[in-house]
Image: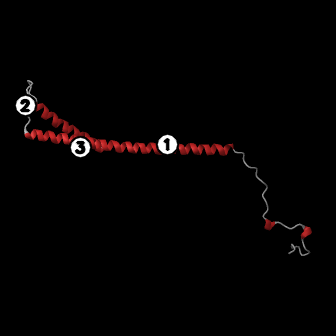
Amino acid sequence: MQRAQEASQATAAARKSIGAIMSSSRAPWGGNNALSGSQVEELEKALKALEAKASEREMALAEAENKLAERDRALAETEALLQAREKVIDAMRKQPRPKKAAPSIPRKWRRWPSSRRSSTGRRPR
């Protein structure tokens, strides 16, 4: 933002300089006055400054366009991810929930049937 203000101020100053030279080179009755060497140099400097500021603005504009394009890409990617997430959530809601099975007893806690037990109460080897 500050760069844009500086460029605008420099452009305005160059335009004033060019306008002053051009108005002094025009005769009020329509004749042409020749510009002095210093006026020509000043005019060239002002034109070069305007050209430099114009190229600086073009570079800043290109940079801003690149940033905007990057933000647009990021936004599109985020929107696509959100839509995919919503589809996954909808699919999960539509799936029937599995019925809970009775909890199984771990094998090491199970007892052998009494027919297979020995007289000591332990299982046979």
In this picture, residue 84 sits left or right of residue 71: right
Residue 52's disc is 3
Q: Is residue 63 above or below residue 25?
A: below
The quarter of the picture where the N terminus appears is top left
Who comes first in sequence, dot 3 or dot 2?
2
- How many angstroms separate mark 3 from mark 2 (CA)? 29 Å
Amino acid tagged 2 = Asn
The kind of residue tagged 3 is Ala
The C terminus, quarter of image: bottom right
Q: Which residue is mark 1?
A: 76
Callout 3: SS: helix
Residue 107, percent from left and from top: 79, 65
Where residue 2 sits in the image (x, y, percent)? 29, 44
- Disc 3 + disc 1, Cβ < 8 Å: no
Q: Which residue is mark 2?
A: 33
Say left or right for 109 vs 19: right
Q: Earlier in the sequence, mark 3 or mark 1?
A: 3
In this picture, is 116 found above or below 68? below
Rounded to the nearest angstrom, the CA distance separating label 3 from label 1 is 36 Å
Residue 93: image quadrant is: top right
User: Taking 86 as reference, is 106 left or right?
Assistant: right
Q: Position of residue 111 (x, y in %)?
A: 85, 67
Location of residue 19 in the rendering, given as x and y in whole percent from the top left corner: 16, 33
Q: Please, what secondary structure does the residue beneath circle 2 have?
A: loop
Mark 3 is surrounded, within 10 Å at the Cα level, by few (under 14), some (14 to 19) or many (20 or more) other residues, namely: some
Q: Secondary structure at mark 1?
A: helix
Distance between the Cα atoms at labels 2 and 1?
Answer: 61 Å
The disc at residue 39 is none
Question: Callout 2 environment at 10 Å: few (<14), some (14 to 19), or many (20+)?
Answer: few
Three-letter amino acid code at the position of disc 1? Ala
Q: Is 111 positioned to the left or the right of 2 in the image?
A: right
